Amino acid sequence: MPWLNSELAPETRAKAALAAMTLDEKLRLIFGYSDQALTELAKVPDEIVAPDLKRYVVSHQVKGSAGFVPGVPRLGIPDQTQTDASMGVRNSFIPSTALPSSLATAASFDPEVPRAGGVMIGAEARATRHNTMLAGGINLAREPRSGRNFEYAGEDPLLAGIMVGALINGIQSNHIISTIKHFAVNDQETLRTSLDVTISAAAMRQSDLLAFELAIEKSSPGSVMCSYNLINGRWGCENDYLLNKVLKHDWGYKGFVMSDWGAVHSTVDAANDGLDQFTGFCCKDDKPWFAPPAMKAALQSGAIPRNRLDDMVERILWAMFAKGVVDHPVQVSPIDYAANAALSQKAAEESLVLLKNDGDLLPLRGVKSIAVLGGSADKGVLAGAGSSDVTPVGGAVTIDNHTYLPSPPVDALKRELPKAKIAFDPGSDLAAAASLAAQSDVAIVFVTRHNSEGSEASLEMVGNQDALVAAVAKANPRTIVVAETGGAIYMPWIDEVPAILEAFYPGIRGGPAIARILTGKVNPSGHLPISFPASADQLARPDIAGLGKPDGTPEEVLYDEGAAIGYKWYDLKGYKPLFWFGHGLSYTNFELSNLAAQPDGKAIRVSFAMRNVGKRQGKGVAQVYVAPADWKKAGWEAPKRLGAFAKANLKPGQIKSIELTIDPRLLATYEAAGNNWHIRAGEYRLMLGEASDDLLKSVAVTLTDAVWSASTTN
Ligand code: BGC
């Protein structure tokens, strides 16, 4: 069995294994089962899934996980055991370590944070017998209300590409496969299985697809998960343009495309338009599009060419060999949960964003009494819901149907400030909350905003939370708000409170991370990966397309903001959001100097220095934005784009020289006619600062005209 020789190239091994396979064996690899199959498969007719295969699936599947694809034991090809998702192993029977939300780790602006997180969750996947992680969520936060923004890495393609690429690298360092998902433009949850997104090729290439392209280049995920929605009239999982042309041809992608659960709508079109593996089959009412009877008929009639089936299987085998799934079989092994929780805490400490700190109220110093109010801060920290919902070590706390991770900020504050009197009030009675706040040195109000897969979250706070903040702030001017949210929220009370900490969903050790930042043990260094709009009239679409219609209703949406997402949109419109992309404060101050830039081929090389000019150690985030002198003439979607960024850990007085390169695609526009990237000649300004609205230094470079193919295969 030459394909089991790990000295050979994965391409060679995949071809050799393929050549040894029977038709039935090939068909096993392209049809996957969901966890529900364990109980439901018996009801599926035997002609669709043969009895011996049913027995195999039921006896080999990891109970409680997302999915399973049977291997070919005769040839030493292992089963694919699939678990969700980007924040940790999701298995209803196995507890695991939850990282902060992916949106939070993107806020670290340090790829080492998601990489280390990926190493940890990938190791937990291995140790629980999973060799495929359905991770790598990267849909851009085009719709600030999207219920899944917490699973993704924000609004900017460069930041998202780097952060998600790093996560996937970390996961796959465990010799397992990670997906990247959901391909593509699956940017809202409302009518997610029936929405038809209209968007130009150029807008996609410069936004959502660019995020995927950058992340795939950096990390080579074994699989790409195609999305539920339609894009320009074609389903995500039968989309010749996205799957065959862009992904496999232009980007030279060698792995396989797996479907999202229930996202397949045909046999012949899906196979010919680029889907390689149907996943998540369970029940007698499911359409078995890639099951043996349908595939055999399509092969026999020639509707699906034989070599297309071989290509599907070869891609799956390539990923299994290339990522180490075959050479390093997964097995159940012990997990050091304490070490993993500590890693998750560190990720949170790098990621939480200090949004406001008037009069240096934070860090808390010398306070004798603190009133903590609301947000179930005595019970835990909020987590998002859906397929990324981890069963946490220590057990989930369920409050109002929402999952809280067992890491109460109140307990952590008591540990950090043993001498202070810390009292908690749930905040349901405004008068009681205000009275407790009035009697305390400082008040900390926890507000929560629950987000879930499958539905959108309004940016307004639910219940009496806005009133609670206003009442407490009135009673005690030294009021701090800690927001545990899946994304942006409106803050009608912003001018009434001096300090705001955005904690996102901070993970299994969120409590200590919050407490250590509030008390100054940790200097905050997160910066926003999304802008916070000030009001609904600033949104590209005041109404979410299809909102209120029953799931499955066909609906079209025109994403005519194109690539102008987030800060690009606000820039374009001249709006002033509540907080801009890239914003984040520290307990120290940084100075950026010596900015210089020069063209380097089609790219631009930028250098500068960052100095800590404050009194304490801290991590600064420098961001370089590019702005054409005439952005309309340059064909850009908006006046400026993030071109590069860096985070540096500096002691007081310490200075560091930093050199960064701006990828030519971030200077170009995509031209569909010739399938080209094009940089227009002219002057481009490089602007350096610590947020997209705080760019104090700039230099200009002159670029010459450059056109090159967007395809790496021709
Ligand atoms: C989600 C995917 C997930 C899959 C399997 C789907 O509903 O959209 O992100 O990986 O379920 O659980």
Image: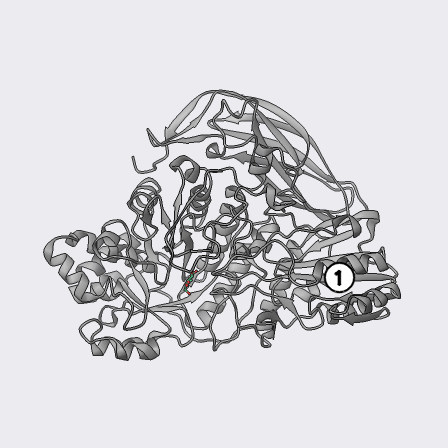
Q: Residue at x 83, y 53 (%)?
A: 361
Amino acid type, callout 1 = Leu
The x, y position of residue 116, in whole percent, is 55, 58
Side of 450 relative to 243 (left or right)? right
| Vertical comparison of 561 with 79: above or below | above
- Along the horizontal axis of the image, is 623 left or right of 300? right
How many C-alpha atoms fall within 10 Å of the one at disc 1: few (<14), some, or many (≥20)? Answer: many
Q: Using the rendered image of the protein, determine whether residue 705 is visible from the camera's viewpoint.
A: yes
- What is the total number of numbered labels drawn onto the structure image? 1
Residue 520 visible in rendering = no
Which colour assignment does the render follow?
Answer: one colour
Q: Position of residue 265 (x, y in %)?
A: 28, 57
Report which quarter residue 696 is drawn in.
top right
Q: Nearer the viewer, residue 656 or 435?
A: 435
Ligand 1 in which quarter: bottom left
Nearer the observer, 148 or 52: 148
Q: Is 50 placed left or right of 412 in the picture?
A: left
The quarter of the picture where the C terminus appears is: top left
Q: Position of residue 50 (x, y in %)?
A: 20, 75
State the image coordinates of residue 519 (x, y, percent, origin top left).
Answer: 78, 60
Quadrant the N terminus occupies: bottom left
Which is nearer the eye, 537 or 597?
Answer: 537
Query: Image height check: is 578 above or below 339?
Result: above
Q: Quadrant of residue 482?
A: bottom right
**Residue at the spot x=53%, y=50% of the render?**
163
Residue closest to the far left: 301
Within the image, what quadrant is residue 69 found in? Answer: bottom left
Nearest the eye: 582 or 264: 264
* Residue linked to disc 1: 468
SS type, badge 1 = helix
